[in-house]
Amino acid sequence: MTASYWSPESWRARPALHQPAWPDPAERDRAVKSLRDLPPLVFAGEARSLTEHLGRVAAGEAFLLQAGDCAESFDSSADSIRDRLRVILQMAIVLTYSGGMPVVKVGRIAGQFAKPRSSPTETVGDTELPSFLGHMVNDIGFTDAERAHDPNRLLTAYHRAASTLNLLRAFTRGGYADLARVSNWNREFVASSPAGQRYSAMADEIDRALRFMTACGITGAVAPQIQEVELYTSHEALVLDYEEALTRQDSLTGQWYDCSAHMLWVGERTRQLDGAHVEFLRGVLNPLGCKIGPTAGVDEVLGICEALNPDRTPGRLTLITRLGASRVGDLLPPLLAAVRDEGHAVAWVCDPMHGNTYTSATGRKTRHFDDVVTEITGFFAAHEQAGTWPGGVHVELTGDAVTECLGGSDQIGDDDLDQAYETMCDPRLNGRQSVDLAFQVAELLQSRR
């Protein structure tokens, strides 16, 4: 790491954008002190393991699938969490089997409780109130009490993250993720779609392969990866009071890790080189991500690489581009060339969601499935041109049968959005659209093999 001074609280001397306006500093201090006394949510060794996996992504030897909810809810049920996991596992199976690549699985989960907003306030009728900033900060209901910034929600976020992690560990290590269950993951609303039918055919092939392996004596006892899955957690490190309180010094190495998640990223709105978020993240040894939008120039991206990964450690830094379907072909190649020529060992990942958000004719914020695919296709083409590796995709999805993004095999139209528009913030792909997208990405991967 850089030799300049750093401590978990050194970010406080820098401009900190998109932070809650806690009304009572004393109450905030009590909540943060309580957080500091709680056990870590993840462990340094797990974060180091993910860094190693992402190093293989940076080297072109694996592919990253980073996926999950736009903004997690404190009200998420166990079934909802399980179904979100199921879609991630389905996509990973498609990418591994059809794309022919090892897939590193990272969820936007167990911590994605805060969101930056373009405006600090929201107006409904004649009433203006603070914007909803995620359940870590306030509530989505539109009253003074619900929109007040409450630091006690930091503790609720911790406990919700802990319970979600417990559930994920049970599912990924307790039999639910067993490859023998691949067919069982295909619930009706996915199975009845063209992508679901394609998935079912693939699952039958996997079942036959597993029966052959069992006959040859290769079982879960011999190869645990048949029955278990490594799933890592990530979220945007937005609310720095929360992140600082969960930053701990590893007893084995003496190095600092943010133990709120395995991987943290800095967002498009908070990646200022002289800002608090970059200052905080440069000092923790977790693998890091940085969102790169259309305003990011070559010098800024190289500055981010130097600030967050000055030692050029493979797997330390993932650059997540969110450039838009119509602009990725022009904006990405110069960034790829500059980072390549400076010798930065980064993993490049495409976020095809945020650059393609618009308001539909019916007034709903949405994204079109075709734009999502177009940006990913342009992302792969730019890497082909630069001789670099298109390392992964970063998508917002849900296991619920929502109608939030247009298009896909069901041809969701403007008039369909109100049928099941349930997101608290940004529109998400549903299960059918997610599996469909995985097959299309797998075909792009096959062309690079």
Image (tube, rainbow, N blue to C red):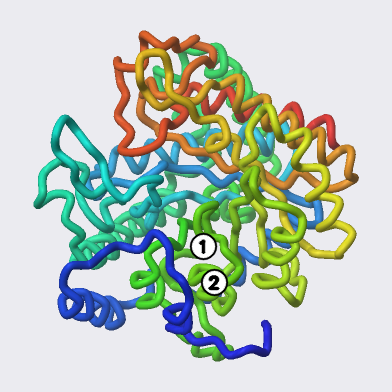
Q: Which residue in the protein does label 1 denote? A: 264
Any part of residue 295 in sight: yes
Give how far across and how far down residue 82 sits, in percent. 36, 41
Q: Is residue 60 above or below residue 32?
A: above
Comparing 294 with 321, the one in front is 294
Amino acid on which the number 1 mark rests in the picture: Leu
Give how far across and how far down residue 163 sits, in percent. 28, 58
Residue 153 lies left or right of residue 261; in this view the side is: left
Number of numbered discs on residues: 2
Residue 77 lies left or right of residue 333; in this view the side is: left
In the orientation shown, which residue stands out farthest toward the front?
126
Name which quarter of the figure residue 361 lies in.
top left
Residue 27's label in the rendered image is none
Q: Residue at x 34, y 43 (%)?
A: 81
Give how far across and how far down residue 330 sits, in percent. 78, 35
Q: Is residue 7 above or below residue 130?
A: below
Q: CB of mark 1 within 8 Å of CB of mark 2?
A: yes
Q: Which residue in the protein does label 2 denote? A: 281
Residue 182 lies left or right of residue 393; in this view the side is: left
Q: Is residue 343 above or below residue 171?
A: below
Query: What is the secondary structure assignment of the residue under circle 1?
Result: strand
